[in-house]
Amino acid sequence: QMKGAIFDLDGVIVDTAKYHFLAWRSLTEELGFEFTEEHNERLKGVSRMTSLDILLEIGNLEFTEAKKLEMAGKKNRLYVEYISQLDQSELMPGVKEYLKRLRKRGVGIALGSASKNALFILDKLNIARMFDAVIDGNKVSRAKPDPEVFQTACHELGLQPRECVVFEDAQAGVAAGKAAGMQVVGIGKPEVLREADLVITGLHEL
Ligand code: BG6
Ligand code: MG
């Protein structure tokens, strides 16, 4: 029996993955190497600085910490520019209906996201009030696949891990949910999200 539902944000609640991709690609174009959608799978769910490290590994490049902070800052400014136009039309299919249904059933609802832009996005989408707890990249120090973000969310809902279900679109996020001892519903492709207990194409399926 699910008492708590913990949702990832990017790629589960809202279709922002394409904006992350575009913003990173603008950086890789500048650096002069190719960055494909397949590479992008590895960036999903992981923190901004870890994403940059993975990118630089793909491009086989090394930079100082100061230069990396500058590059991540530039990527984020571009990303924020993209998402400043977000509205409810970019909610993933079935999100609002499912959240409402859970509320009615008395299920606790939390956000468990790596993003430092999470509150900004929830606000743009006008759905912040649907969440009983919001755990984002500003509140945790260890990035997915570490379970910290989901453990903190579960704790804030006042529940045990086995009472919570995690909804994730990223490999790192599915791994984090399993490491937290929770049931995980993967949103996306079964061949990508192998570790998930169930894989669906979107919340509209539930
Ligand atoms: C995750 C995304 O939700 O947040 C990642 O899937 C992103 O792609 C990470 O890098 C950090 O986001 P932000 O908004 O803090 O740069
Ligand atoms: Mg995601």
Image (tube, rainbow, N blue to C red):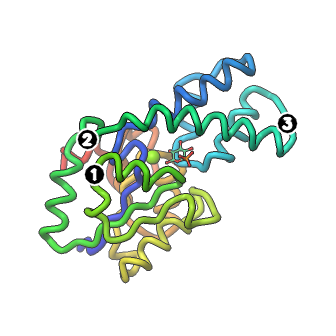
* Relative height, residue 9 to residue 90 (above, below): below
| Disc 2: which residue | 88
Check disc 3 and give the amino acid type: Phe
The foreground one among 51 and 58 is: 51
Disc 2 is placed on an element classified as helix
Q: Is mark 1 within 8 Å of ligand 1?
A: no
Which badge, 1 or 3, is on the more N-terminal residue?
3
**Percent x, y for residue 10?**
43, 45
Q: Is residue 58 above or below residue 100?
A: above
Q: Secondary structure at mark 1?
A: loop
Side of 41 relative to 7 (left or right): right
Are the residues at dot 1 and dot 2 in contact (C-beta closer than 8 Å)? yes
* Residue 104, image x, y percentages: 12, 68
Residue drawn at x 45%, y 53% is 118
Whichever of callouts 2 and 3 sits on the residue coming sooner in the sequence is 3
Q: CA distance from mark 1 to mark 2?
A: 8 Å
Label 3 neighbour load within 10 Å: few <14, some 14-19, many 20+? few
Q: For this view, does 184 lie left or right of residue 53?
A: left
Amino acid at the residue labelled 1 = Asn
Question: Comparing marks 1 and 3, which lies closer to the viewer?
Answer: 1
Query: From what the image shows, is residue 126 above or below residue 135?
Result: above
Q: Could you tell me which residue is drawn at 28 percent across and 72 percent down?
A: 108
Query: Which numbered dot is residue 199?
Result: none
Residue 1 drawn at (x, y percent): 23, 74
For residue 63, the mark is 3
Q: In front of the other: label 2 or label 3?
A: 2
Distance from mark 3 CB to nearest ligand 1 atom below 8 Å:
no
**In terms of depth relative to the viewer, which is nearer, 131 or 174?**
131
Give the residue at mark 1: 126
SS category of the residue bearing label 3: loop
State the CA–CA distance, disc 1 to disc 3.
Answer: 39 Å
